[in-house]
Amino acid sequence: MTPVFTTERLGAQPKVCESVEAMHGTIDRWAASSGSAGGPCGIWAVAPRATGEPVAEIEVGWALHPGHWGRGLATEAAGGALARGWTAGLTEIYAVVYPGNDPSVAVTQRLGMTALGRTKRWYGAELDAFWILRPEGRADDVPPLAYG
């Protein structure tokens, strides 16, 4: 399978499951690791069919097995995802981090993201939100969204 994007050490590919049962197992593991309860969980890119343009807020995220922590892989993968987003025409991208997850906050800092503060806006949980504009459009102001 051709990667969606590559970095110096990584290639990003869509997660493909061999069967519906395997897909449900993956979703159950994501839900258990993120503390989500009930309802379907997963990762989707949502775009109207008429335009193909992504809906509103686009998020970059990372979750690595602990055996791969501390090697710069999350920063590299997220940086590659940001570059792919900029190439696709996105102008801003968000990230959210569970409070106290200092290594992930460090990733957002290495990516040049701006801390927006704590919010309950997404995922039904209190999270620390971060934001970045495409580099040629970078501004010091916070986007016009309600946080808190």
Image: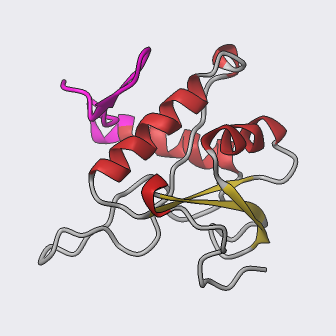
Residue in front for this viewpoint, 102 or 98: 102
9, 91: nearer the viewer: 91
User: Can you give x and y, in whole percent of width and height, for residue 14 in the image?
Assistant: 31, 37
Where's residue 38, x and y in %?
60, 63
Q: How is the image coloured?
A: secondary structure
In this rendering, the answer to whether 82 lies above or below 122 is above
Q: Quadrant of the N terminus?
A: top left
Which is the main secondary structure of the residues drawn in magenta?
loop
| Residue under the image location 57 percent in, 23 percent down | 73
- Does the magenta-highlighted stretch encompass residue 16? yes
- Which residue sits at x=66%, y=57%? 36
Question: Would you place residue 123 above or below residue 145 in this image?
Answer: above
Quadrant for residue 70, please give it.
Answer: top right
Name above or below for residue 90 compared with residue 106: below
Q: Quadrant of residue 106?
A: top right
Looking at the image, can residue 112 be seen? yes
The picture places residue 40, in percent across and down from the top left corner, at 48, 60
| Residue 124 at x, y percent in the picture | 68, 71
Outermost residue toward the left? 50
Q: How many marks?
A: 0
Residue at coordinates 34% horizontally, 43% vertically from top-left? 84
Quadrant in the picture for residue 22 = top left
Residues shaded magenta: 1-22
Query: Would residue 14 be counted in the magenta stretch?
Result: yes
On the picture, is 43 further left or further right than 67? left
Q: The C terminus lies in which quarter of the figure?
A: bottom right
Visible in this render: residue 24? no
